Image (tube, rainbow, N blue to C red):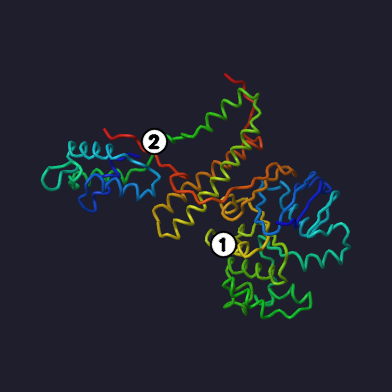
C-alpha cells in the first residue's frame, strides 16, 4: 500500500498553554488503512486530525497528504485541498439548519461547482437516508443527521475520510450503525482516520490503533485480523466439581 | 458458577443422558467452557443422591441412562437463578499480580509492562469484536451475549491500564 499521510516532527503550540498541543509527532498512514487515534481528552488527538485535514497549521514540522506538503499551500490552496481531498465528520454534525438534508450534502460539491445531485441521492440511498432527503436537520434523529454529515463528507469522493468522535453524540445503536457505515466504506477502499475514546468501536474496524498522550504518540499498535474460535478468545470457568 | 445448576437448567426441557447434557452445555456456551464427561456423570449422581433429579426409565448402561428433573431440583434451580452473584469479585488473570510485583522489582517503572498489556487488550477487543459479529451473523445469541460481556470487561481492563499509565493512581508507596 502506498503512503497517503505523513507527519514529520509535528509540533503545535497553543498560546496560553491550552491543552491539545502536539509535541514532535511523526507518523504515516497508508492508503486504504482504517486507523483509530485514541487518547484522553486534551491529549492532542483532535489537533492531530485538524492538522491532517488542513483545518489548522503546525507550529513546526511538516504535514503532507498525497505527497503535497500542506505548508507550501496558501489559504486558497488549503481550502481547495480540504474541499477536494478531505471529508470531515464531526461529533456534533454541523449541518446548516436552514438547508434540507440533500442541500447539506450538496454544499461541498457546489463549492466545487459540480452538479452532483445524482451522486448525492445515490450516496444517501447507500447510507439509508434517501427517504429524508427533503427534511430539515431539526426533523432528523441524531443518527440520521450524522449519516447526512457522512454523505456530505463523501460527496467530493475524498482521498481521506476523517472522523472526530463521530459517535460521541449518538445513542449506542445509532453509534454502532454509523461505525458499521465507516467500516463498509473502508472495505470499499476508503482511507479512514478515526478519533475516538471508545476502544470497543475502534477495534471493531481499525486494525491500527495509535495512542496519543500529552501531545505525543505513545503507542502505535498493528492488530491482527484473525478469525479465532470462541474458546481461543473466551474461557468461562466454574467451580470444578459440585459437592 | 457451578456445573450443578447448568445441568439442572438443561434438564428443565426434557430428560437427557450424560452426553446430551455435556453437548448442550458446551453448545450453549459456544465451547468456552469444556466439561469432561466424567464431571457430568459425577454431577448427575450427586444430584440424584440429593433428590434433585432421578433416573428416567430403567437403570442400565450409564452412558445411556437418562435423568429427569424433580420438583425439588426445579426449586433449587429457581432459587439459584433468583440470587444475585454477590460473592467477592474473582480476578484470575496474571496481570493483577504481575503489576504488583513489577512495582517492587522495576522500581515502580510499570510503563513497559503496561504498554505490552495494553496491546494485548486491544488485540483481545478486536478478536472479541469479530467473534461477536460472527455469533450474531450465525444467530448464536447466547454466545453473542457472552462475548458482549467479555468485550465490556476488557474495555474496563483497558481503562484501568490507561489510568495506571497516566499516573493517576500510581501514588508512591513504600513496599512492605
Q: Chain of mark 2?
A: B
Image coords of residue B98 (percent x, y): 55, 29
Examine the rendered structure and indicate whether residue B36 appears above or below residue A193. Answer: above
Tell me the residue at 83%/55% (across/down): A57
For the residue pair B29 and B51, the one nearer the viewer reads as B29
Task: Please give the label number shown on residue A180.
Answer: 1
> The C terminus of chain B appears in which quarter of the rendering?
top right
Element class at badge 2: loop
Task: Please give the label number shown on residue A146.
Answer: none
Element class at badge 1: helix
Q: Chain of mark 1?
A: A
Image quarter of residue A140: bottom right
Tell me the residue at 45%/60% (across/down): B137
Position of B41 compared to A167: left or right? Answer: left
Tell me the residue at 75%/48% (across/down): A27
The residue beneath circle 2 is B87
For the residue pair A160 and B160, the one nearer the viewer reads as A160
For the residue pair A202 and A55, the one nearer the viewer reads as A202
Callouts 1 and 2 close, C-beta under 8 Å = no
Residue most extreme to the front: A1
Image coords of residue B160 (percent x, y): 57, 39
Image coords of residue B74 (percent x, y): 22, 47
Amino acid at each position: 500500500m502506498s503512503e497517503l499521510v505523513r507527519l514529520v516532527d509535528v509540533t503545535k503550540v497553543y498560546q496560553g498553554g491550552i491543552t491539545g498541543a502536539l509535541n514532535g509527532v511523526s507518523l504515516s498512514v497508508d492508503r486504504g488503512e482504517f486507523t483509530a487515534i485514541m487518547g484522553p481528552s486534551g491529549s492532542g488527538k483532535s489537533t492531530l486530525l485538524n492538522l491532517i485535514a488542513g483545518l489548522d497549521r503546525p507550529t513546526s514540522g511538516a504535514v503532507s497528504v498525497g505527497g503535497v506538503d500542506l505548508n507550501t499551500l496558501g489559504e486558497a490552496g488549503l481550502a481547495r485541498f480540504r474541499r477536494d481531498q478531505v471529508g470531515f465528520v464531526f461529533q456534533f454534525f454541523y449541518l446548516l439548519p436552514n438547508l434540507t438534508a440533500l442541500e447539506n450534502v450538496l454544499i461541498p460539491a457546489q463549492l466545487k461547482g459540480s452538479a452532483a445531485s445524482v451522486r448525492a441521492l445515490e450516496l444517501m440511498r447507500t447510507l439509508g437516508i434517501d427517504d429524508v432527503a427533503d427534511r430539515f436537520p431539526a426533523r432528523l434523529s441524531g443518527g440520521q443527521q450524522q449519516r447526512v454529515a457522512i454523505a456530505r463528507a463523501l460527496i467530493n469522493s475524498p482521498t481521506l475520510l476523517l472522523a472526530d468522535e463521530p459517535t460521541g453524540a449518538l445513542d449506542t445503536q445509532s453509534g454502532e450503525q454509523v461505525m458499521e457505515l465507516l467500516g463498509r466504506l473502508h472495505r470499499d477502499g476508503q482511507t479512514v482516520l478515526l478519533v475516538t475514546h471508545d476502544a470497543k468501536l475502534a477495534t471493531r474496524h481499525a486494525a491500527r490503533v495509535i495512542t496519543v498522550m500529552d501531545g505525543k504518540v505513545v503507542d502505535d499498535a498493528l492488530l491482527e485480523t484473525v478469525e479465532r474460535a470462541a474458546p481461543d478468545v473466551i474461557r468461562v470457568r466454574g467451580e470444578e466439581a459440585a459437592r | 458458577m457451578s456445573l450443578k445448576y447448568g445441568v439442572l437448567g438443561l434438564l428443565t426441557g426434557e430428560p437427557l443422558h450424560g452426553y446430551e447434557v455435556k453437548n448442550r452445555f458446551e453448545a450453549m456456551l459456544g465451547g468456552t467452557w469444556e466439561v469432561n464427561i466424567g464431571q457430568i456423570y459425577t454431577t448427575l449422581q450427586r444430584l440424584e443422591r440429593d433428590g434433585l433429579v432421578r433416573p428416567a426409565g430403567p437403570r442400565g448402561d450409564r452412558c445411556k441412562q437418562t435423568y429427569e428433573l424433580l420438583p425439588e431440583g426445579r426449586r433449587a434451580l429457581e432459587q439459584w437463578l433468583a440470587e444475585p452473584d454477590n460473592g467477592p469479585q474473582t480476578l484470575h488473570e496474571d496481570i493483577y499480580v504481575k503489576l504488583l510485583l513489577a512495582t517492587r522489582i522495576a522500581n515502580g517503572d510499570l510503563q513497559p509492562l503496561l504498554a505490552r498489556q495494553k496491546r494485548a487488550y486491544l488485540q483481545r477487543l478486536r478478536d472479541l469484536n469479530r467473534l461477536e459479529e460472527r455469533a450474531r451473523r450465525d444467530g448464536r445469541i447466547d454466545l453473542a451475549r457472552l462475548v458482549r460481556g467479555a468485550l465490556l470487561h476488557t474495555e474496563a481492563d483497558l481503562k484501568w491500564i490507561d489510568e495506571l499509565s497516566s499516573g493517576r493512581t500510581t501514588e508512591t508507596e513504600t513496599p512492605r
